[in-house]
Amino acid sequence: MCGIAAIIDLRITDETPQAVARRDEQLTDMLEQIRHRGDTECFAERLAEPGIALGTNRLAIVDRDHGHQPQADADQLVEVVFNGELYEHHLLRGELERLDHKFRTTSDTEVLIHAYLEWGESFVDRLDGMYAFVLYDRRTRTFLAARDHIGVKPLYHAVRDGTHYLASEQKCLIGKADRIEEVPPGTYIVNNEEPVRHFELGTEPPDCSDREAVARYRALFDAAVRKQTDTDLPIAVLFSGGVDSAAVLEASRHFHPAVTAFTVGYEGAADIEVAKRYCAENGIPHVVRYLDHVAVAEVIPTVIRGGELFEAIDVMDSCVAYFAYQAVREHGFKVALCGEGSDEVLAGYALFMTHPDPVELMRYRVHNLYRTDLQRVDRMSMLHSVETRVPFMDRFVLDFGYRLPMSWKLRDGVGK
């Protein structure tokens, strides 16, 4: 739901107002590079003090009136800037309230603060969602930077002369240090220590029959969509006409009263006709955006810089996604769902049929989603200030699907 940035020098405990102002200006320049990741009126919400500057471009979705960042507890012990969404954060809030924590907002950002104050670093294990955040603890002068289980939301880190720079996109960090590192998915870092893993995909097959697996997968998927459509804002669903996006679209309609399908492609394409027919037969509001070869070519430089992508296939796919999310935003939507990730987990691509080791191929593709498909989804949607949620990448759906035997995914020459 945001773009975040931070400049942290833990060695500095006191400095002149002029030095603080320079750091604040530097932080604002970083946020300017990712202005598109938030609402215009929520640009550069920030804090600067000796040694520390934290800021965000906020895309206001949860508690839009009171979710200003950085957020802190009432005693100003902890500050946090947060990008993403915590699903079912009300459950964690309720647990913390029973432990006598007092909340001042209904935002999911504030839940991070109280969870950290209650459970320390281990609170990351309790989080369900897509997220990247930087938390600063004034008591111990430490920072904690974390990223969600599979890397739906991005976070980068660079260090120069003892100063840490963190941001949602690499372009914010150009010139800040010789090397820009990506905070690995499913990890957190404390100060300059090695990343600590808080999520690991399982390898043990589930204890159930294949028929039971179908029911369990469906239940997990429905729960993921229910969580991800829990908003009072209208929902857009990127609908290609294929099986995955159709599943997301149908489940979204079950859990949310205002869902619109968006389809993008070239006029005459068979998948567009399938999508149009499906929506017409089911009474689903449907927006179709037709692509133009000239317009697609002209947007390539914007896509490359915005997406921070360089492989041809990723750039090509991103060009299509660019116009899809442009249409979503032009129609007034801030929240979207898409069907990315299913093919990697459930061996949906034809190449799984011929690969000598489809299990290893699945592992490779799933663990690289954060720098391919998920990066494309994040960058192209956020270029248009749209937050896109990915039900097939829900931590419980993903873990269950990942552990299913490959013989169930590829059976008698038939795939997904």
Image (cartoon, helix red, strand yellow):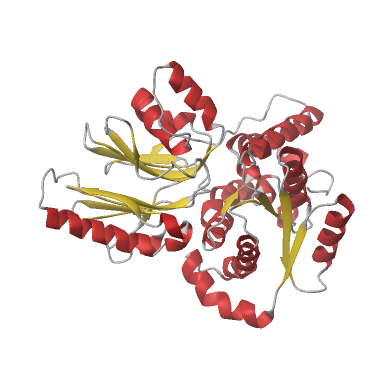
Q: Residue at x 54, y 48 (%)?
A: 367
Residue 195 visible in the snapshot: no
Q: 149 and 415: which one is in front? A: 149
Residue 124 shows up from this direction: yes
Residue in the picture at 33% in, 65% down: 174
Kindly give the residue lying farthest to the front in the view shown: 65
Tally of numbered tags: 0
Q: Position of residue 184 (x, y in %)?
A: 43, 47
Percent x, y of residue 18? 13, 57
Tell me: 318 left or right of 108.
Answer: right
Q: Is residue 335 left or right of residue 66?
A: right
Q: Is residue 113 above or below residue 195?
A: above
319, 91: nearer the viewer: 91
Q: Residue at image x 65%, y 37%?
A: 224
Estimate the x, y position of residue 121 in percent, counting from the top left. 36, 30
Residue 167 versus residue 82 in the image, above or below: below
Which residue is at the front of the view, 295 or 271?
295
